[in-house]
Image (tube, rainbow, N blue to C red):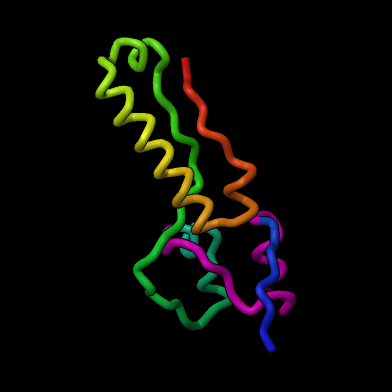
Amino acid sequence: MRVHRPVSFGELYTALSTGVVDGPDNLISVFNLIKLYELQSHLHLTGHTCAFGPTGISEVFYLGLNVPRKLACDRGVGNRIGERKRCGGDQARRSRAQRVR
């Protein structure tokens, strides 16, 4: 039985080379960046991605929006947080939307 096992990004290459994990779930750019092609003979192209980057907006810009646009912005951030929760579980719960000055 295969079990999904989280591995820190810095330890991924070593974990793959020693057999601690069978394979990662990364973008093609990451596959090439850290030379995973040296360790893996196959790459599955599933066409999906989960991104956990922060959502940022300038406070000056936000305060300058009219009410309908502020509501649309807030709704969009709320939808993004919902997607993160569905996509990333615990990692998403630790993330927070922030306004950037």
Q: Position of residue 13 (x, y in %)?
A: 65, 65
Is 40 drawn above or below residue 51 in the view shown?
below
Residue drawn at x 35%, y 37% is: 76
Please indicate whether residue 62 sits to the left or right of residue 81 in the image.
Answer: left
Find out whether residue 20 is within the magenta segment. yes
Quadrant position of the N terminus in the picture? bottom right
Please state which of residues 53 and 10 is positioned toward the viewer in this rendering. Answer: 53
Please state which of residues 58 and 20 is positioned toward the viewer in this rendering. Answer: 58
Please indicate whether residue 74 sits to the left or right of residue 3 in the image.
Answer: left
Residue drawn at x 42%, y 60% is: 49
Is 47 drawn above or below residue 75 in the view shown?
below
Residue drawn at x 43%, y 78% is: 44
Is 75 drawn above or below residue 17 in the view shown?
above
Please state which of residues 75 and 23 is positioned toward the viewer in this rendering. Answer: 75
In this figure, what is the number of numbered marks?
0
Residue 21 picture quarter: bottom right
Q: Position of residue 15 (x, y in %)?
A: 71, 69
Please indicate whether residue 48 sits to the left or right of residue 30 in the image.
Answer: left
Residue drawn at x 53%, y 52% is: 85
Q: Position of residue 35 (x, y in %)?
A: 53, 65
Q: Most extreme residue toward the bottom, as rendered?
A: 1
Please state which of residues 14 and 84 is positioned toward the viewer in this rendering. Answer: 84
Please indicate whether residue 57 sits to the left or right of residue 39 in the image.
Answer: left
Find out whether residue 22 is within the magenta segment. yes
Over which residues does the magenta segment extend? Answer: 9-29
Residue 2 picture quarter: bottom right
Is 62 drawn above or below residue 22 in the view shown?
above
Q: Position of residue 94 (x, y in %)?
A: 64, 43
